[in-house]
Amino acid sequence: ELADVDNNNGKILNINEVDNIGSDKLHFNDADILTAKLRPYLGKTILNTFNNFTIGTTEWIPLKLNNKIKKEYLFYILLSGFYCDFVKDFMSGKQHPRIKPSLLYFFQIPNIPLSQQQKIVGEIKKELDRQEEIKKQIEEKRNEIDKIIEEVIKP
């Protein structure tokens, strides 16, 4: 489900098993990437790394890539603010705006060599790792602050 994916990083927060596929679910086994089409969930994109049956909401757009683009490269592009700003201008529907999957044919992705795509992916991963380390440091400092407050509050 869209709610089970973290915003703007593709991390899956929760996985549920289902017994059957109803009308509100689709099978995504052969998709490389899933990206959200519903407005409040733009920026939710995941790499389909599951080896078994992948079933999810019909609000995902499944993408199967050719060998001219690395899936990690497209994954990061679809997580970008640039992409979200682009699709917002083409959404339809008043109550639950969404993009039509065919819109993605008009979203232009730079046609660069696979080696350059991999370099960009490596740079992004390096930056994301750095950000995760900073988040851990912030959490440690917050825990230190909580200990100081706890010591002051204790009778």
Image (cartoon, rainbow, N blue to C red):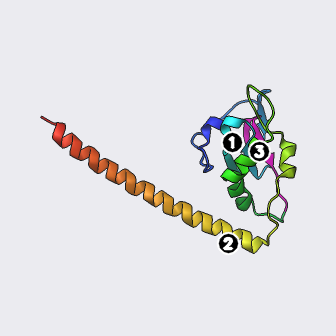
Is 107 contained in the magenta span?
Answer: no
Direction left: furthest residue: 155
Name the image quarter holding residue 98. top right
20 is higher (above) or lower (below) than 151:
above
Type of amino acid under label 3: Val
51 is higher (above) or lower (below) than 23:
below
**Mark drawn on residue 87:** 3
Residue nearest the observer in this picture, 51 or 133? 133
Residue 40 appears in the figure: yes
Type of amino acid under label 2: Lys
Query: Of discs 1 and 2, which sits in the foreground?
Result: 1
Name the image quarter holding residue 61. top right
Q: Position of residue 101 (x, y in %)?
A: 84, 42
Q: Are marks 1 and 2 in contact (CB under 8 Å)?
A: no
Marks 3/1: CA–CA distance:
9 Å
Type of amino acid under label 1: Leu
Q: Label 1 belongs to which residue?
A: 42
Q: Label 2 belongs to which residue?
A: 119
